[in-house]
Image (cartoon, rainbow, N blue to C red):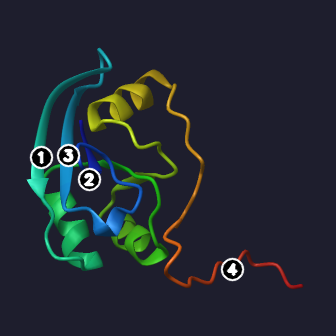
Amino acid sequence: MRFAIPVLNGRLNPHFGRSPSFAFIDVDPEKKQVIGQQILPAPQHDHGILARFIKENGAAVVIAGGMGAGMQQSLAQEGITIILGAPTLEPAEVVSQYLNGTLVTAGETCGCGGHHHHHHDGHDH
């Protein structure tokens, strides 16, 4: 199983779309252990290109801090599971905590501050 983590300065980048590189972490799902790591430069910031890049590099799960709705949609269309609200730890540590059930996530969906997104919950006010 392979995970993708957006990386900045060796740690999880809380802003997914501005990550200069991605860590691809290989794990043994039976032993719940990290067995390898590869850091690759990110392609241009385009939802479709970025989602395909992650898929083509074999990741089934993305663990990130914040992510906009458009990127979430693009990843979902590629069949990639998304976990958001992760802390800014080293990528292998993030994945290890996830595998052990100890990863604390904030459940944040965007967190990008500079953008304006409209979140609709389906309720009429």
Report the residue at 86% width, 85% height from top. Answer: 124
Extreme right residue here?
125
Residue under label 3: 23
- Cα separation between marks 1 and 2: 11 Å
Residue under label 2: 8
Residue under label 1: 39
Residue under label 4: 120
- Cα separation between marks 3 and 2: 10 Å
Are dots 1 and 2 in contact, CB under 8 Å? no
> Up-down: is 101 above or below 56?
above
Q: Nearer the viewer, residue 113 or 74?
A: 113
Q: Say which element carries label 4.
A: loop
**For residue 48, what is the image quadrant?**
bottom left
The disc labelled 4 sits on which kind of residue? Answer: His
- Cα separation between marks 3 and 1: 4 Å
**For residue 105, what is the image quadrant?**
top right
